[in-house]
Amino acid sequence: MASDQHDPDALRVHFGEELRRTRMRKKLSQNQLASALGCTPQWICQLEKADKTVSEQTALDLDTYFKTDGWDQEDGHFHRIYTTIRRVGRSRVLRPGFDTYRLQEAQAIGVRAVAAQLVPGLLQTEGYARGIMDQSEPEATLDARVAVRMERQEILDRPNPPEAMFVLDESALRRPVGGSKTMADQIDHLVEMARRPNVRILVMPFERVTPLALGGGFILLSFAREPDLMYVETGHVSQLIENKDVLFRAGVHFTLVMGEALGQAESIAFMLRAREEYL
């Protein structure tokens, strides 16, 4: 196993082998284990053959049922393998530099973002997030990327969430990512988020054809005791910028873009009208 510690596929095979060995040691058939866990024998078979992505709940259920070693519920044998799979898988599916950004984002007290083409990751539904990804990628890779995106959004649900302001280009509402149902659900989510006291989502309509409206997207993070940071994506690489001059200009740019966008109430009404086109 030592040589496979950085290969999520090999780790899934290891998980399946461990499951099969444990099941056989307990003299259980796949049918019997499936009945005990409330799933199908096919599901157990797929896990043992590494044909199915391992979920955290499955790992916890197996540790509980088999009473595998661990100090607490989340320190059992199967859960430890699952945690390693998730950690290694994420390191392979994230853009270079993005993991550092995630750590900074989680500590931010303020988020300001200009979204030029797509709905920002902090506001995406699971269906939309999956829809914008490369569908030729393995299912496990897509699952890992979606999971990372959904976990990022937890900062907006914590007890003291950051003040978040987004300027969303109209193209993000018009581009039918994932189909009509996915887009309708996504816009519903945007409207719901826009009504939170700590979130503002302003729409930049197509009619605002100005240099400010045509600029690229970026994210500014503010912290309680540290200087601001700017995050941009270029090609397949993520970049965190600390240069004070760049940050100052980006802050001014964001303020001006906000001034050109629709107001909060107008933006919500605009999004609701856009949603009707997907019904």
Image (spheres, grey):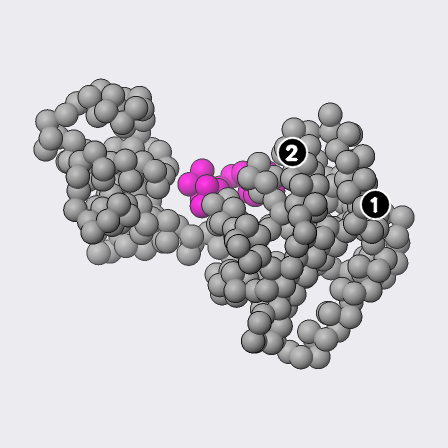
- Mark sitting earlier along the chain (1/2): 2
Residue beneath the point at 17% across and 23% down? 29
181 or 188: nearer the viewer:
188
Residue beneath the point at 64% across and 51% down? 120
In three-dimensional space, the C-alpha distance between marks 1 and 2, rounded to whole angstroms, equals 20 Å
Q: Amino acid at mark 2?
A: Asp
Q: Is residue 53 visible?
A: yes
Residue 225 x, y percent position in the rendering: 56, 76
Task: Please state the extent of the stretch shown in magenta in the rendering.
Answer: 131-145
Q: Residue placed farthest to the bottom in the image?
A: 244
Instruction: Say whether residue 177 is magenta.
Output: no
Badge 1: few (under 14), some or many (20 or more) residues near its Cα, within 10 Å?
Answer: few
Residue 31 x, y percent position in the rendering: 22, 20
Q: Which residue is tagged 2?
A: 185
Instruction: Say whether residue 139 is magenta.
Output: yes
Residue 16 x, y percent position in the rendering: 24, 37
Q: Secondary structure at mark 1?
A: helix
Residue beneath the point at 66% across and 54% down? 198
The part of the image, by quadrant, that contains residue 277 is top right
Q: Which residue is tagged 1?
A: 266
Q: Amino acid at mark 1?
A: Glu
Q: Secondary structure at mark 2?
A: helix
Residue 132 x, y percent position in the rendering: 60, 42
